Image: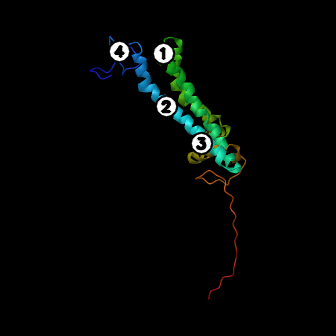
Amino acid sequence: LINTRYGTSDNNWCFLVEKVDTPSWAIAFWVWISFYAWTWSIIVIDIVIYIIGYRIIYTQLSELNRSYFIPIITKLQYYPLIIIICWTLSTLTDVLEYVGYVNMVSNIMPCTQGLLSTFVFWYTLNVRSYWVSYITRGESQTSVKRMSLLRSILGDEVSRGESNYNRVSVRKHLVSVSIQVKPYNDD
């Protein structure tokens, strides 16, 4: 891997240079170690964090608080799934050194990760409708960003007119206020 030239243009991995006496498994090994091991480690860490978060929400929160966080966790489950879908085929074709039509598809799949994540975000109907109203009516962009975040997290509760949301923690707070009026004494 350390030599006087950077790599060759005849292979997908410009940082790997095949020498004459290189074993057939060496390129696949270095592709896995230098790139895919890190990619899949992050994917596994992402899934573990998701499972830990889900278990904490499901076991340690009261039923009232759980009802707010379960929709968030449900929507977040699609993002690790998208990453797995986008990187599985690419990993298999590169490590197995497969050549053919499947290889072309595997080169395109990682590039679609952002597009599929956008589709999942827009899957929330309330977010989509609020952005459409921004485009058609010219509403404030700051309010659109704030409301699209609230609507993507809380769903229909915002659209039903329940406006008791704290903007920092995105939770509903009930507040009781009592006012007593006393006469003013100037003494």
Tell me if label 4 and label 1 are in contact, CB under 8 Å. no
Taking 173 as reference, is 3 above or below it? above
Residue 96 numbered mark, or none: 1
**Mark 1 Cα-neighbour bin, 10 Å: few <14, some 14–19, many ≥20:** few
Residue 144 numbered mark, or none: none
For this view, does 108 lie left or right of residue 29?
Answer: right
Front-most of residues 150 and 73? 73
Q: Is residue 120 visible?
A: yes
Tell me how far mark 1 sits from mark 3, CA to CA: 35 Å
Reading the image, the residue beneath label 2 is: 41
**Mark 4 Cα-neighbour bin, 10 Å: few <14, some 14–19, many ≥20:** some
Question: Which element is circle 4 on?
Answer: loop
Reading the image, the residue beneath label 4 is: 18
- The kind of residue tagged 4 is Glu
- The kind of residue tagged 1 is Leu
- How far across and how far down the image is residue 50, in percent? 58, 38
Front-most of residues 171 and 23? 23
- How far across and how far down the image is residue 63, in percent? 71, 49
Reading the image, the residue beneath label 3 is: 53
The mark nearer the N terminus, 2 or 1, is 2
For this view, does 161 lie left or right of residue 110?
Answer: right
The mark nearer the N terminus, 2 or 4, is 4
- Give residue 132's quadrant in the image: top right
- The kind of residue tagged 3 is Gly
Question: Which element is circle 1 on?
Answer: loop
Question: Which element is circle 3 on?
Answer: helix
